[in-house]
Amino acid sequence: MEQTLSIIKPDAVAKNVVGKILSRFEDAGLRIAATRKMQLSQADAEAFYAVHAERPFFKDLVEFMISGPVVVTVLEGDNAMAKNRDLMGATNPKEAEAGTIRADFAESIDANAVHGSDSVENATNEINFFFAQKEIC
Ligand code: GDP
Protein backbone atom coordinates (compact mmCIF):
# COMPACT_ATOMS: atom_id res chain seq x y z
CA MET A 1 0.00 0.00 0.00
CA GLU A 2 1.47 3.38 -1.03
CA GLN A 3 2.07 6.09 1.55
CA THR A 4 2.55 9.85 1.20
CA LEU A 5 3.07 12.82 3.52
CA SER A 6 0.61 15.68 3.87
CA ILE A 7 1.13 18.87 5.85
CA ILE A 8 -1.80 21.12 6.69
CA LYS A 9 0.02 24.46 6.73
CA PRO A 10 -0.32 27.25 9.36
CA ASP A 11 -2.89 29.24 7.32
CA ALA A 12 -5.34 26.31 7.17
CA VAL A 13 -4.77 25.37 10.82
CA ALA A 14 -5.48 29.01 11.80
CA LYS A 15 -8.70 28.90 9.74
CA ASN A 16 -9.84 25.88 11.78
CA VAL A 17 -10.37 23.66 8.72
CA VAL A 18 -8.13 20.73 9.77
CA GLY A 19 -11.10 18.36 10.07
CA LYS A 20 -12.55 19.45 6.73
CA ILE A 21 -9.23 18.81 4.97
CA LEU A 22 -8.68 15.43 6.65
CA SER A 23 -12.24 14.46 5.59
CA ARG A 24 -11.36 15.14 1.96
CA PHE A 25 -8.55 12.58 2.19
CA GLU A 26 -10.84 10.00 3.80
CA ASP A 27 -13.68 10.71 1.36
CA ALA A 28 -11.24 10.06 -1.51
CA GLY A 29 -10.40 6.62 -0.07
CA LEU A 30 -7.12 7.52 1.64
CA ARG A 31 -6.52 6.27 5.19
CA ILE A 32 -4.83 8.28 7.96
CA ALA A 33 -1.92 6.05 9.04
CA ALA A 34 -0.38 8.66 11.37
CA THR A 35 -1.09 12.28 12.27
CA ARG A 36 0.26 14.93 14.63
CA LYS A 37 -0.20 18.63 15.29
CA MET A 38 3.12 20.35 15.96
CA GLN A 39 4.99 23.65 15.90
CA LEU A 40 7.96 23.45 13.51
CA SER A 41 11.22 25.10 14.57
CA GLN A 42 13.18 27.17 12.06
CA ALA A 43 15.71 24.32 11.83
CA ASP A 44 12.88 21.83 11.12
CA ALA A 45 11.45 23.97 8.31
CA GLU A 46 14.86 24.69 6.77
CA ALA A 47 15.73 20.98 6.80
CA PHE A 48 12.36 19.88 5.43
CA TYR A 49 12.52 22.38 2.54
CA ALA A 50 16.31 22.06 1.99
CA VAL A 51 15.64 21.23 -1.69
CA HIS A 52 14.36 24.82 -2.10
CA ALA A 53 17.29 26.45 -0.22
CA GLU A 54 18.53 28.33 -3.29
CA ARG A 55 15.08 29.55 -4.40
CA PRO A 56 14.25 33.25 -3.93
CA PHE A 57 11.15 32.40 -1.87
CA PHE A 58 12.99 30.09 0.60
CA LYS A 59 13.16 32.62 3.47
CA ASP A 60 9.47 33.53 3.13
CA LEU A 61 8.53 29.85 2.91
CA VAL A 62 10.41 28.99 6.13
CA GLU A 63 8.97 32.02 7.95
CA PHE A 64 5.47 31.06 6.88
CA MET A 65 5.87 27.39 7.88
CA ILE A 66 6.91 28.38 11.43
CA SER A 67 4.27 31.13 11.80
CA GLY A 68 1.90 28.72 13.60
CA PRO A 69 1.26 25.03 14.18
CA VAL A 70 0.92 22.52 11.33
CA VAL A 71 -0.70 19.08 11.09
CA VAL A 72 1.54 16.41 9.58
CA THR A 73 -0.18 13.26 8.31
CA VAL A 74 0.79 10.00 6.66
CA LEU A 75 -1.85 9.07 4.08
CA GLU A 76 -2.11 5.51 2.83
CA GLY A 77 -3.92 3.98 -0.14
CA ASP A 78 -3.73 3.06 -3.82
CA ASN A 79 -1.74 5.77 -5.65
CA ALA A 80 -1.70 7.82 -2.42
CA MET A 81 0.94 10.27 -3.65
CA ALA A 82 -0.79 11.18 -6.93
CA LYS A 83 -4.26 11.07 -5.37
CA ASN A 84 -3.19 13.56 -2.68
CA ARG A 85 -1.63 15.86 -5.31
CA ASP A 86 -4.96 15.80 -7.24
CA LEU A 87 -6.92 16.64 -4.10
CA MET A 88 -4.52 19.53 -3.30
CA GLY A 89 -4.71 21.35 -6.64
CA ALA A 90 -2.08 23.60 -8.22
CA THR A 91 0.63 25.27 -6.08
CA ASN A 92 -0.88 28.69 -6.87
CA PRO A 93 -4.47 28.58 -5.56
CA LYS A 94 -5.52 31.02 -8.29
CA GLU A 95 -4.67 28.28 -10.80
CA ALA A 96 -6.11 25.43 -8.73
CA GLU A 97 -9.10 23.56 -10.14
CA ALA A 98 -12.49 24.15 -8.50
CA GLY A 99 -13.18 21.70 -5.70
CA THR A 100 -9.52 21.19 -4.78
CA ILE A 101 -8.24 21.93 -1.28
CA ARG A 102 -6.16 24.90 -2.43
CA ALA A 103 -9.03 26.38 -4.50
CA ASP A 104 -11.35 26.13 -1.51
CA PHE A 105 -9.08 26.99 1.45
CA ALA A 106 -5.93 28.82 0.22
CA GLU A 107 -5.33 32.53 -0.33
CA SER A 108 -1.96 32.82 -2.09
CA ILE A 109 1.06 30.91 -3.36
CA ASP A 110 2.76 31.48 0.02
CA ALA A 111 -0.23 30.57 2.16
CA ASN A 112 -1.48 27.63 0.12
CA ALA A 113 -3.05 25.43 2.83
CA VAL A 114 -1.30 22.11 2.22
CA HIS A 115 1.93 20.37 1.30
CA GLY A 116 2.04 16.95 -0.35
CA SER A 117 5.00 14.80 -1.34
CA ASP A 118 5.65 15.09 -5.09
CA SER A 119 7.16 11.64 -5.68
CA VAL A 120 7.01 8.25 -3.99
CA GLU A 121 10.73 8.50 -3.17
CA ASN A 122 10.30 11.94 -1.57
CA ALA A 123 7.28 10.62 0.31
CA THR A 124 9.41 7.97 2.04
CA ASN A 125 12.02 10.55 3.06
CA GLU A 126 9.39 13.05 4.24
CA ILE A 127 7.51 10.41 6.26
CA ASN A 128 10.77 9.37 7.95
CA PHE A 129 11.53 13.05 8.67
CA PHE A 130 8.41 13.33 10.87
CA PHE A 131 7.43 9.87 12.10
CA ALA A 132 8.94 6.82 13.77
CA GLN A 133 7.91 3.49 12.25
CA LYS A 134 5.86 2.55 15.36
CA GLU A 135 3.70 5.68 14.93
CA ILE A 136 2.56 4.59 11.48
CA CYS A 137 -0.21 2.01 11.66
P1 GDP B 1 4.12 22.21 -4.06
O1 GDP B 1 4.75 20.86 -4.21
O2 GDP B 1 2.86 22.37 -4.88
O3 GDP B 1 3.88 22.60 -2.61
O4 GDP B 1 5.13 23.29 -4.66
P2 GDP B 1 6.74 23.39 -4.66
O5 GDP B 1 7.36 22.15 -4.12
O6 GDP B 1 7.14 23.89 -6.02
O7 GDP B 1 7.02 24.61 -3.65
C1 GDP B 1 6.98 24.40 -2.25
C2 GDP B 1 6.22 25.55 -1.62
O8 GDP B 1 6.97 26.75 -1.80
C3 GDP B 1 4.85 25.85 -2.24
O9 GDP B 1 3.82 25.10 -1.71
C4 GDP B 1 4.67 27.32 -1.91
O10 GDP B 1 4.17 27.49 -0.59
C5 GDP B 1 6.08 27.84 -1.97
N1 GDP B 1 6.34 28.46 -3.29
C6 GDP B 1 6.54 27.84 -4.48
N2 GDP B 1 6.75 28.71 -5.46
C7 GDP B 1 6.68 29.95 -4.88
C8 GDP B 1 6.84 31.27 -5.37
O11 GDP B 1 7.07 31.52 -6.55
N3 GDP B 1 6.72 32.27 -4.44
C9 GDP B 1 6.45 32.02 -3.13
N4 GDP B 1 6.35 33.04 -2.28
N5 GDP B 1 6.31 30.78 -2.63
C10 GDP B 1 6.42 29.76 -3.49
Image (tube, rainbow, N blue to C red):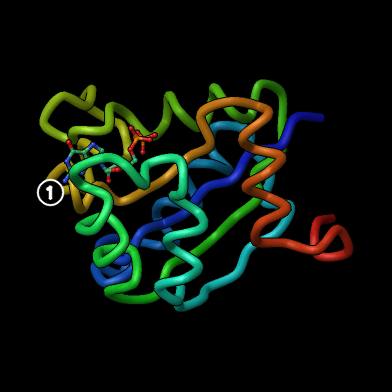
Label 1 amino acid?
Glu
Residue at (11%, 31%) from the top-left corner? 94
Q: Residue furthest right?
A: 134
Is 21 on the left-hand or right-hand side of 109? right
Out of 85 and 132, give the one closest to the viewer. 132
Q: For the C terminus, give its image quadrant.
A: bottom right
Instruction: Rate crowding at label 1 as few (under 14), some (14 to 19) or many (20 or more) other CA atoms within 10 Å.
Output: some
Is 33 on the left-hand or right-hand side of 92? right
Q: Where does residue 109 sit, x and y in percent of width and height?
A: 17, 42
Q: For the N terminus, give its image quadrant.
A: top right
Q: Where does residue 129 sit, x and y in percent of width and height?
A: 66, 57
Q: Where does residue 47 sit, x and y in percent of width and height?
A: 51, 58
> Quadrant location of ligand 1?
top left
SS class, disc 1: loop
Q: Quadrant of residue 92?
A: top left
Residue at (71%, 23%) from the top-left corner? 78
Relative to 81, does residue 40 appear above or below in the rendering? below
Q: Quadrant of residue 120?
A: top right
Relative to 106, does residue 80 appear above or below in the rendering? above
Residue where numbered disc 1 is placed? 107
